Image (spheres, grey):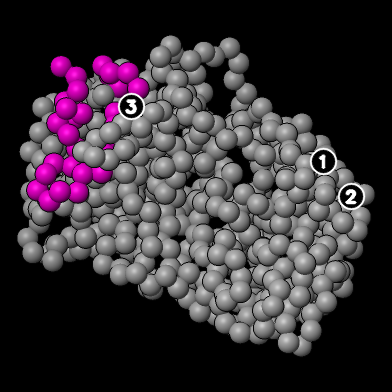
């Protein structure tokens, strides 16, 4: 599901990784290998070891870059792979690996997650019995295949992983039958199904060459028809094992029958006198966007955040302009109140996916999106607000987002804040998902607007608009980080509000303004509006024709 090159080519890469070592003949001067270069594992945390395989004419030791961070590599002679340690300061998410003589397509997903984060697995319903019955035997078979030809660290991980019992699997969501989609609400968004690789069995894990079996070019895989919401889910404890290797190895032994994610998906996003201090959000939106009093009637805004139906345990301390504050309450509830200020007639539905410490569950987020999809099939109009995110792309999240957007449900996602990029250096990529998938959710024909060709999207990446300066706010991701690479947002919105005597500022609080505007639009207009990125200083970031689309 992850759309980076390293994920997309994983089925083709792994057999090369695990079996190509037997054919390598490294010398003291260069590494020689006839295979296509790739990276193992697909993801790794700072301080962990990763490898590049399949390079020819490269010195056996030297330096390479992970994003903008430099690290040393060395030749692992038994395997012929180049081993390197992920720098401690490496930026999170997909980062380019640059090494003289290597292709420019090498990527590593740097996992910026707390130690001990476990692996989440999604299993096709028709493969659940196979996964549980074959789990240990396939790991043991792969351990035998890897003996003496894989790096010692990989062999150790395989032995320890194979000693664990198979994960307990439960339905991700309850099956729903007899649901229909309200006419005219279905969005024409291409749904990229999970690719199912050719069948992997206990015997094929032991054969001498798996390239022909797993290479999608040589043997095009079939695409399943079921969705992420019909999958079974389970947790695999990492027990001190490197999470990236666990994720990669489990996907190898079960190919397209099993997919993986970290169990955590991200976290909530968060000098002079404050502008518009203590002014209610509705008045701020009216003054800055000329909002004449939206409605949103008949639309449900689903707030996936820290809030439950009765409370929001999240607190935050900091400083807003010259105003320090301590233990400011809520996050999700504030997001909902801002959305309601923009669309007072909309119904709010809080779905708690994050805990009071700010950690957000991958599984809860996927389940919440699947619940939205269930409601959308029953009818009505819906908007999702996701003021959470992190640097690592998670496949379950993207698949669940495709599930809801294909049903005509737009999503407003926070772009990410400047502190997401703290400590990064030139050449690092500052990632933030799901916002950085916005272009992948574009649909329909292009529209020419102000000499630019734009396409509407079902996933809006919302940056904060400075309500004092009338331009891109300095708290946005990438601002003030020269040389750091970022995906641009798709739209800006005011992101500074006062609620209950506390300031709420950041892209978290820009996203619900767009959620409310989407709800207003959908209460009287078909589809979703085109929201271009307006960057002219002093000009309102969203056109009045969109803000006040309904009479």
Magenta residues (range): 522-551
Residue with the mark numbered 3: 528
At label 1, counting other C-alpha atoms closer than 10 Å, the crowd grade (few under 14, some 14-19, many 20 or more) is: some
- CA gap, disc 2 to disc 1? 9 Å
Closer-to-camera residue (360/7): 7
Residue in view at x 77 percent, y 71 percent: 33
Residue with the mark numbered 1: 199
The vertical placement of 259 against 457, above or below, is below
Q: Is residue 94 left or right of residue 429?
A: right
Residue 447 seen in this snapshot:
yes
The quadrant in which the C terminus is found is top left
Q: What x and y, as percent, mark residue 144?
A: 89, 63
- CA gap, disc 1 to disc 3? 41 Å
The vertical placement of 23 against 208, above or below, is below
Q: Is residue 525 left or right of residue 189?
A: left
Q: What x and y, as percent, mark residue 472?
A: 20, 53
- Asked if the residue at tag 1 contacts the one at tag 2, i.e. Cβ–Cβ closer than 8 Å, the answer is yes
Residue with the mark numbered 2: 204
Quarter of the image where one finds residue 195: top right
Quick one: SS at disc 2? helix
Residue 348 seen in this snapshot:
no
Quick one: SS at disc 1? loop
């Amino acid at each position: 599901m992850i759309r980076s090159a390293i994920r997309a080519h994983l089925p083709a890469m792994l057999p090369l990784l695990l079996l190509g070592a037997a054919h390598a003949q490294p010398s003291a001067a260069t590494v020689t290998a006839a295979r296509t270069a790739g990276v193992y594992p697909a993801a790794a945390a700072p301080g962990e070891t990763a490898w590049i395989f399949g390079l020819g004419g490269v010195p056996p030791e030297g330096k390479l870059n992970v994003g903008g961070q430099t690290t040393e590599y060395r030749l692992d002679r038994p395997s012929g792979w180049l081993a390197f340690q992920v720098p401690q300061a490496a930026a999170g998410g997909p980062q380019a690996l640059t090494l003289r003589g290597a292709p420019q397509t090498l990527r590593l997903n740097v996992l910026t997650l707390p130690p001990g984060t476990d692996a989440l697995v999604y299993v096709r319903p028709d493969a659940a019995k196979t996964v549980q019955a074959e789990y240990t035997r396939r790991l043991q078979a792969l351990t035998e295949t890897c003996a003496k030809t894989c790096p010692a660290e990989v062999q150790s991980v395989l032995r320890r992983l194979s000693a664990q019992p198979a994960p307990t699997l439960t339905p991700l969501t309850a099956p729903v039958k007899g649901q229909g989609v309200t006419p005219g609400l279905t969005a024409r968004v291409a749904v990229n199904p999970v690719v199912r690789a050719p069948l992997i069995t206990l015997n094929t894990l032991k054969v001498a060459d798996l390239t022909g079996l797993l290479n999608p070019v040589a043997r095009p895989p079939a695409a399943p028809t079921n969705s992420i919401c019909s999958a079974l889910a389970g947790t695999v404890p990492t027990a001190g094992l490197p999470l990236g290797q666990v994720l990669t190895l489990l996907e190898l032994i079960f190919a397209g029958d099993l997919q993986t994610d970290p169990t955590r998906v991200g976290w909530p996003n968060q000098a002079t006198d404050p502008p518009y201090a203590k002014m209610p959000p509705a008045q701020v939106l009216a003054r800055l966007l000329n909002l004449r009093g939206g409605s949103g009637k008949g639309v449900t805004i689903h707030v996936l955040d820290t809030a439950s139906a009765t409370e929001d345990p999240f607190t935050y301390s900091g400083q807003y302009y010259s105003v320090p504050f301590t233990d400011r309450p809520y996050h999700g509830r504030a997001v909902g109140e801002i959305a309601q200020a923009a669309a007072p007639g909309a119904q709010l539905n809080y779905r708690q996916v994050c805990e009071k410490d700010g950690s957000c569950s991958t599984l809860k987020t996927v389940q919440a999106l699947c619940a939205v999809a269930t409601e959308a099939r029953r009818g009505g109009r819906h908007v999702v607000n996701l003021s959470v995110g992190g640097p690592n792309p998670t496949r379950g999240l993207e698949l669940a987002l495709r599930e809801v957007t294909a049903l005509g449900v737009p999503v407003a996602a926070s772009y990410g804040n400047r502190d997401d990029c703290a400590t990064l250096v030139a050449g690092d990529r500052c990632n933030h998902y799901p916002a950085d998938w916005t272009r992948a959710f574009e649909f329909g024909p292009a529209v020419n607007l102000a000499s630019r060709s734009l396409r509407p999207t079902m996933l809006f990446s919302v940056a904060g608009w400075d309500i004092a300066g009338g331009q891109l706010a300095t708290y946005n991701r990438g601002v003030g980080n020269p040389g750091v690479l970022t995906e641009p947002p798709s739209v800006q919105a005011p992101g500074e509000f006062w609620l209950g005597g506390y300031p709420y500022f950041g892209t978290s609080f820009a996203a619900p303004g767009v959620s409310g505007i989407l709800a207003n639009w959908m209460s009287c207009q078909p589809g979703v509006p085109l929201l271009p990125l307006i960057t002219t200083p002093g000009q309102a970031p969203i056109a009045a024709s969109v803000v006040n689309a309904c009479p």
